[in-house]
Amino acid sequence: MAKVTFRDRIRQDRPILGDGAMGTALHQLGIPLNTCFDELNLTRPQVVAQIHREYIEAGAELIETNTFGSNRYKLEKHGLEDQVAAINAAGVDLARRVIQASFRDNVYLAGSVGPLGVRLKPFGRIKPEEARAAFAEQISALATAGVDVILFETFSDRIELLEALAAAREVVPDMPVICQMTFAQDNRTLLGDLPATVARDLYHAGADVIGVNCGGGPEQNSQVLQAMRQAVPDAVCSIFANAGFPAQVGERMMYPATESYMGEYALTFKAQGAAIIGGCCGTTPAHIAAMRHALDDTSLPLPKIDLLEVNGDEKSDVVERPTELARKLAAGRFVVTVEITPPRSFVPQKMLAAAQLLQESGADMVNVADSPTARMRMSPWAVCHFLQSRLGIETVLHFPTRGRNLLRVQGDLLAAHALGLRNLFVAMGDPTKIGDYPEAMDNYDVTPSGLIGIIKQRMNSGVDQAGNSIGQPTTFTVGGALNMNALDLDREIGVLRKKIDAGADFVLGQPVYDPPVIERFHKRYQEIEGAPFTLPVLMGVLPLYSLRHAQFLNNEIPGITVPDPLLKRMEDAGDDAPQEGIKIAQELLLTMRGLVQGAYIIPAFNRFELAAEVIDVLHVAPAR
């Protein structure tokens, strides 16, 4: 029986299962990361062939050649620019021989083509015609050697991918072409294109298959795939996801997704209509085998796929995925975040180590304060960027209005969004007179509730306060401050009402040491507003460190009351006061878990190890 053509195969109901990562597998075999992996087709073909063989044995039906970086620009960095044809031909030959030796007639061979590794004009120095010529050179070598399909993957520049596709149509007009883009955590390409824009352009340019690969893990990629499917319902789509979002452990990049997790997502991708499903960075033959098992098990139900909400008037562009904070709040999950104070220097190592401790202890995210007590410290923008890029932990950026005019406020918000910072806590901020520079400017143009309105109602709709377009809408999740133990509770509720009307997504509460305070607040709120208070609250939890510390909070910090029984416990604890403070905080955390939707832990004196101990109680106590 003749083999089904690739174009006919992608139209069948049963998706094609691709292979997984080549680079990950080579590195696991001890190949250094600075090696030219493509040259191994010539120098160590048996190693590459063994990886192809393992993926076929795992059930892959689409094998990619080890030629991702086999263009002259990337090979030039290794002095191999004159071996483009030889390296690509060798990659095809050894993969084809492995497929033939497997005696499986349902396996297709894809010629892998990655980006050039240099920027095209106007963002780089390479002319479009030069890029097209480089792609044509590689594609010609792959096609001559005998691939079934050309696979463009991990492109972050839409224009570069369109040039690559144009080169393929010129060189091998009848060969099937798969075009896959990679997207950053905000579900945009590095140059800001949304999935819908990419999908429409590739589809109209003649790609046989459009899709997504690399970037984040399966969850993010499934969002991008869904956006593409909704933008171009008639398109054939593919998805090759990483095995989760990578984290650096020592000198290695580790991918957390288990084999069973990838298997489950294979069913999600199938339910979304993907015709080709595979793995990217971090995926192994074991992951592919689990995906094969899931796709073949007809007893497993496919998950229900909901339509994504579209973005305002741009009905073709899909809103970004929510932040982890927004997603967990919407799902009713109990959220734990810990405050970190930026260092008083430009050295971030100790702060990063503290954040990693909190991450390992189970904190969902960290809050980064902005000049607390009006003392000079590193910019919280830089701190948040360090934490998210190096540790992969989500952050909440504190954003005081004090000391900023409206022009600077909006510019800073655009900068935050550009850095991938999506969670904001808007507050007034501490007056400069109490800090290092008491004569510093202390003015402000907008109140916290007013700024929440600007962010949620204007910038998240794509315009600034003056009504000017900012290009694309921001996607901030925004919180405000709340003191449930305020002396004038009616006034506090009035201010809170303004924040709710402005669009606040959550509030951070001042520490409460007496849980009935929360119930009294809810009662009074309903009496005034005539409706229950439903906005998610992340209640402050400040572990007491000593009797003196407890007395200071009780006597000198407005809005905080430490009941006498707790003061007595701290006094009786003596030298063990820090541990007693942890016990009290754990008790409060467990009690409040049924009253609020999260905890905002504030480590006293930057004792982050104590905060980690407080979080530990959530791992052993059953949820209420």
Image (cartoon, rainbow, N blue to C red):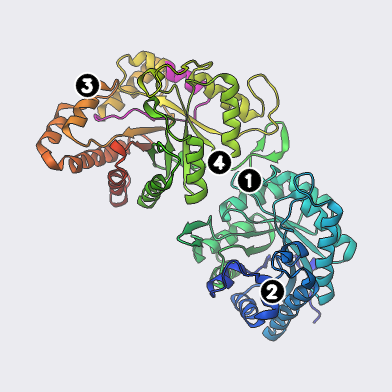
Figure check: 14 above or below 495: below
**Label ID, residue 86:** none
How far from the left and from the top, in percent, is residue 279? 61, 64
Front of the two marks 4 and 3: 3
Q: Mark 2 points at which residue?
A: 39
Element at label 4: loop
N-terminal of the pair, mark 1 or mark 3, is 1
Residue 11 drawn in magenta: no
Q: Mark 1 points at which residue?
A: 187
- According to the picture, the residue beneath numbered tag 4 turns out to be 322
Q: Is mark 2 on a helix, strand or loop?
A: helix
Q: From this viewpoint, is residue 72 visible?
A: yes
Q: What element carries label 3?
A: helix
Asked if residue 307 is positioned above or below residue 76 in the image, the reply reads: above
Q: What stretch is highlighted in magenta?
A: 495-514
Q: The residue under label 2 is which amino acid type?
A: Glu
